[in-house]
Image: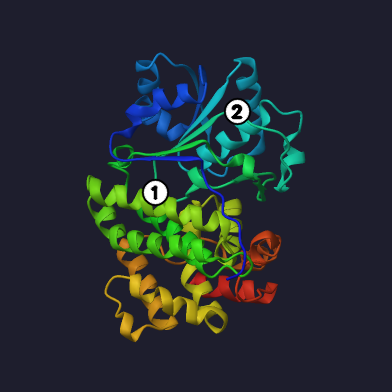
Amino acid sequence: MDSFEFQTARRLVMGPGCISRLPALARELGITRALVVTDRGIFGSGLHARCTDALRSGDIDFAVEHNVVADPPEAVVLEAVTKARALRIDGVIGFGGGSSMDVAKVIATLVPSQQSIAEIYGIGNVRGSRLPLIQIPTTAGTGSEVTPIAIITTGETTKTGIVSPQLLPDVALLDAELTLGLPAEVTAATGIDAMVHAIEAYTSKIKKNPYSDLLAREALRLLTQNLLPAVRQCDNLQARQAMLYGAMLAGQAFANAPVAAVHALAYPLGGHYHISHGLSNALMLPHVLRFNIPSAGALYAELCGVIPAENALAASGEKFIEGVTRLIAETGIPRTLRAMKIPREDLPKLARDAMLQQRLLVNNPREVTEADALRLYEEAYG
């Protein structure tokens, strides 16, 4: 067995209603004035009150930063950092989807730091410590609550990653009650995003390891068995808790065995057309899987048995792709770039932009050229 290293959040707290434990967890971390970071949709719906009411019940002072948007731009992050410093915040709570949790990580990192945001982009560039950080996902998808990664929009259409152990939170709190009533299309897209994390971690070229494999397989089992019940029954608490657990396991897996070409090709879709990250991944997943068959077919066959209705005795890479594609179709989400009204003449631009994601492409089991990327976008166009 090759040597490997594995990192994750320091503490996991899981179960319906566990948001009630937030004040005690905050006090244990020495938080007396928290910044709750969430997005405009959650703030507008009032869901953030589940977090702030818990803090208030425990006499924890707080302020709310609710200006996070999907694909959060650098300016939003820096404004929040300025606000946090002015308020003398001593702890950060990310509450929401991946964007809110990513912004929370960067705020917690930059507030006590002398580094600029430009200096921490890339891998391993964060110096020093951060503020105490608690992450509370309200969707089962990104796994950001257990990853050392934050993705920030740095230009009109480009995204840049920050990858550093300091971004791993002190506590990840997973309460499925916070996900009840999530719309079917959001449940589907975020759930498929988590599936992609598990699949790409299992086939990651450079850092794939036995521990990440174990987590990826169990994540994919939980996600594929509970995705449709969660999509079809918005109040199915058992399915939603299983989805949160699966997404977290997938996050732990890809935080240590990084994602690859599906994500690399998905990022330009989000950057140019503001398609949600989960849906962008879902649009590209079947096509990248088929492209990877020559190099990853045996690994896909190993995963075949965890897909519902697939016979493990007849496992193959092709059967795995069929099962995944069928599951995506049954969720009812859009399946082609044409359906998303993306101009066909934009595909070469998307292929060029995908090539900028070498941080991800190096992990793919099969090399991807710009010509390959263009062909994959053409297949996804439909």
- Where's the N terminus, which quadrant? bottom right
Helix, strand or loop status at disc 2:
loop
Query: Is residue 302 visible to us here?
Result: yes
- Residue at point 34% right, 16% down? 57
- Residue at point 63% right, 40% down? 166
The image shows residue 99, relative to residue 348, as above or below, that is above
Mark 1 surroundings within 10 Å by alpha-carbon count, few (fewer than 14), some (14 through 19), many (20 or more): many
Its colouring scheme is rainbow
Give percent across and percent down for residue 280: 50, 58
Give percent across and percent down for residue 112: 68, 25
- Residue at point 29% right, 80% down? 311
Q: Does residue 123 appear left or right of residue 136 in this picture? A: right
- Residue at point 37% right, 83% down? 315
Q: Does residue 351 appear left or right of residue 29 in this picture? A: right
CA distance for labels 2 and 1: 25 Å
Q: Which mark is residue 270?
A: none
Mark 2 surroundings within 10 Å by alpha-carbon count, few (fewer than 14), some (14 through 19), many (20 or more): many
The residue pinned by badge 2 equals 131
Query: Mark 2 or mark 1, which has the lower sequence index?
Result: 2
Q: Does residue 168 appear left or right of residue 309 in this picture? A: right
The residue pinned by badge 1 equals 140
Give percent across and percent down for residue 283: 47, 64
Query: Is residue 282 visible to us here?
Result: no
Pick whichever, 196 or 204, lies toward us. 204
Pick whichever, 213 or 239, lies toward us. 213
Give the number of marks: 2
Which circle, 2 or 1, is nearer the viewer?
2
Q: Does residue 186 appear left or right of residue 309 in this picture? A: right
